[in-house]
Amino acid sequence: MHFSTILLLSLTTAPFIHALSLFDSLRTSAGASQFADFVEGDPILSAIYLSGVRTVFAPSDEYFPVTNATLLKRNESVPTSSEQRKAEYQATYSDCQINNAGSNFTMYDNNTIVVDQSPAPGTLTRRALPPSRPRNSSTFPPLRIFSGLGNNVSVIRGDIPYDGGLIQVTDGFFTLPQPLSTTATQTGNTVFANAVDAANLMSTLEVKQDITIFVPRNAAFLSSNSSSPPNLSYHVLTGFVGYLPLLVDGASFRTRTGTNITVRVSGDDTFINDARIVHANLVLPNGVAHVLDRVLTPPSTSPVLFSGTSSPVTSWETVRYIIGAWSVALSVMLVL
């Protein structure tokens, strides 16, 4: 073997020659010993994490008790099936370095996380967590990772090597992506969910792969002055998963109506036409949703409603009744 080849091999393998094993590194270098116990204590999870995983997102010890209270409350060392699924969502075969992070990664369980280094648009949903350790901002830029329900966690210590890849230490677990119906309901966007249900479209939107859905929040429906039914098709993109980092200023996308929506970025805000994204990157099993502060109106006088079946959508009166009932209920709540 030539000396140059030996030198090249030594340089490329040097960073990992003295790297610890995954579980040793989690305990001694990453400050994530509880997560190490959580994974190593289950044979299925342990086998997964030792099967060639390249990047592990590990909640630190100061956050693990808060974000995994269910396991600790049961006082059992073996995770349930739902807890196994949550742990499977923390690992990927992809290389994710902090200073070279892509926009999204497919995790072991085939769900996606969205990496965003930009300022947060609108209101973000975060759990109440204890303050994290100070982060060295000169080492890596702010890094937020979005998952199911649009929840996000931050990387608080990054690029910690182990003998199979890297550990990124986070301030919580990712949230497993839920179907559109569950996501819309749990994030409080019930009017949109009811409108889609009334139009018999929910099953279609939940099985269609590579989909982007713009979800007007409840207040957007209540403040809409339009006498026409909402054009659900104009809120749907297919064949493209539009995570927020991919929605760049000036981009235009064709909706299910055949007409386009346009992205506009102003400061820290992202707009779809004139509607502002107020809750971004609600990761779905089959794509992503973004919550808007307005109902989108296509540039036409004759709305073409999206239907997942051969029959036209004629359920607007039902939707109007739902919106009216919701408005009355809200008024009563405000009076009380």
Image: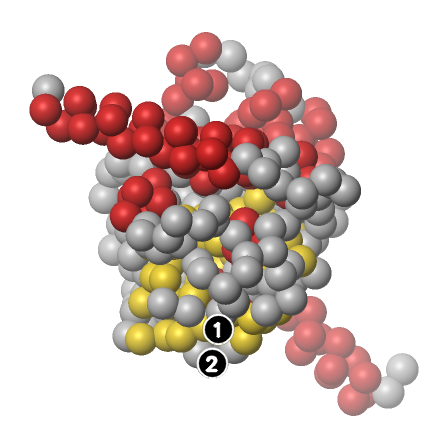
- Vertical position of residue 147 compared to residue 333: above or below: below
Q: Position of residue 61 (x, y in %)?
A: 38, 36
Q: Residue at x 10, y 24 (%)?
A: 335
Disc count in the image?
Answer: 2
Q: Quadrant of the C terminus?
A: top left
Q: Within the image, what quadrant is residue 32 found in?
A: top left
Residue 313 shown left or right of residue 228 in the figure: right
Q: Write the residue at 28% across / 37% down.
A: 129
Q: Are marks 2 and 1 in contact (CB under 8 Å)?
A: yes
Q: Is residue 293 above or below residue 312?
A: below
In the foreground, 307 or 265: 307
Residue 312, x across and y down, in percent? 67, 43
Mark 2: amino acid: Gly
Q: What residue do we see at 64% from left, 59% from top?
A: 256
Q: Mark 1 highlights which residue?
A: 262
Disc 2 to disc 1, C-alpha distance: 6 Å
Secondary element under disc 1, as helix, strand or loop, is: strand
Image point (25%, 24%), residue name: 329
Left or right: 174 in relation to 121: right
Q: Does residue 277 show up?
A: yes
Query: Which residue matches tag 2?
Result: 250
